[in-house]
Amino acid sequence: MDSYDSSAMTPSERASSRPKDYAIGATPLEKRLESVRKQTTFVCTSHRKKIPECSQLEEDIDPQKVAFLLHKQWTLYSLTPLYKFSYTNLKEYSRLLSAFMIAEKQKGIAVEVGEDFNVKVVFSTLLGVKGTQRDSEAFLVQILSKSQLPSENMKEKVLWTGWFCCIFGDSLLETVTEEFTCLPLFLANGAESNTTIIGDWFQKTFDCCFCPLSINAFNLSWMAAMWTACKMDGYMATTEFLWAVPCSPQSLDISYAIHPEDAKALWDSVHKTPGEVTQEEVDLFMDCLYSHFYRHFKIHLSATRLVRVSTSVASAHTDGKIKIRCHKYLIGVLAHLTELALLQIE
Amino acid sequence: MLREDCPSQLMIHLARSLPLPSNVTRPRIDLVVFVVNLHNKYSLQNVQESLCHVDANFFLGKVCFLATGASQENQCSIHHNTILKLAHAYRSPLLFCDLTTKDFQFSVAQRLVRMLQVCAGHIPGVSSLNLLSLMKTSEIPSLEDL
């Protein structure tokens, strides 16, 4: 009976029954196993979370430099640590990746007549996009195309952008050796074919693994609550939610838009402890929305699945698509996403 | 579950919520299984409301929680710790299963039928309280930190 019990439980719970007496000075592998066990024995997502406040490093970010990161839809991936990646070799990587890209395109993967093969890949670092000093520096990869027309010779159009970052990735940093660079969050904007080519090159060169990051309804409701809690000055966009109703033959979508002031007022009435967000507050916030909707439409929104959340701070879709609207909370949003990426890696 | 071999007569009553209407006579209930779909917050709310209508004597081993859908992490609306806490609060066993797969259906059915036989008193020497203490996992001390 007991043996079946453990197989019915998830493997992580089975691992917790082993004794935790590891000697001090354990190897990185043992430290890694230890952290995985710690993560899964105790509460995986914290029931208390700090509201994303501006860290002192955020002052280093030049709003102009990161402006191109805002108002764009990014597809999220989680990435395992990169082996033997060096920030000094960026030019070398640009060269290698450009060659790889051109070779791949000429292989006929992207079959289009008149395809512009004058593409080049540029690596650059993104200064200031990190949580603590220990986090690895974020870097950006862009595919630029040189225009064929002589008059526009100097202009380069950006075809595809991807960036790697790590915000407050301490739990991962502790478990890897010096040769690995931890940048668990990867965001891409542009054609899917380019993303696959770039992904393949990185996987071959640095022995890492990309995995699409999806955000489940539970995490989306946390994001909704945390972003509503953020103080916004200036223009506030409507807060919108989208639910998918599982029914056949076609699925229904329910969209619910709230005035941002009302959403903030609701959150303020629910929120008790300053500087912290608890699970109960998030649940209460969502329950208020559900009961209000039920009173008017007699539909139980809690029986459906939350698919998209959109606020003035950012908007997120369950398929792992994110759009950040406010540079003030950029680091906060990225920190939350990094946490989700780390959970997926582990 | 009805396909399982069972020496005595096995009857299953399905209900969306409790309390059951009191104007109908029904045989003695030996096991109450609460099914929670982790993709659906409404099912959890329903179960929480129904729990209030269950007599306290049932919680001595005659109640079981069944959580489905934990394998599809990206569709979960409820964190699995929430259901763990609920099961811990009511001191009842919790089974995770994926009811869409035939193999899992079969093994869960087997499990529930055995539990039912114990709860009905058909297995000599084992009572539902004994079964409850046997099924306690070592997780319980850490859950008290929550």
Image (cartoon, coloured by chain):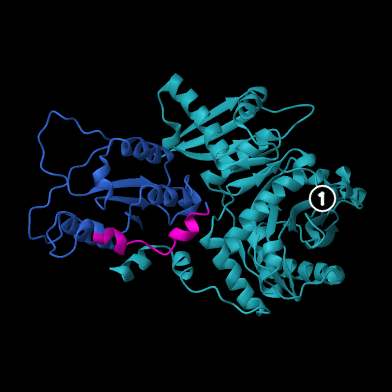
Please determine whether, in this image, residue A10 is positioned above or below residue B100. below
Magenta residues span B130-145
Q: Residues within 10 Å of mark 1 (few under 14, many from 20)?
A: few
Residue A340 x/y as whole percent: 61, 54
Q: Quadrant of the N terminus of chain A?
A: bottom left
Quick one: A204 or A277, which is closer to the camera? A277
Q: In the displayed image of the protein, which residue is found farthest to the left?
A: B8
**A111 inside magenta stretch:** no
Judged left or right of residue A26, residue A18 is left
Report in which chain the residue with disc 1 lies: A
Residue A79 in picture, x, y percent from top left: 65, 63
- In the image, which lettered chain appears blue? B
Q: Is residue A110 visible?
A: no
Find residue A23 and report its horizontal and vertical position in percent: 62, 79
A335 left or right of B39?
A: right
Q: Residue at x 14, y 57 (%)?
A: B121
Q: Which of these two is toward me, B136 or A310?
A: B136
In the rendered image, is residue A70 in sight?
Answer: yes
Kindly indicate the quadrant of the structure image that contains residue A169: bottom right
Tag 1 residue:
A157
Q: Which chain is in cyan here?
A: A
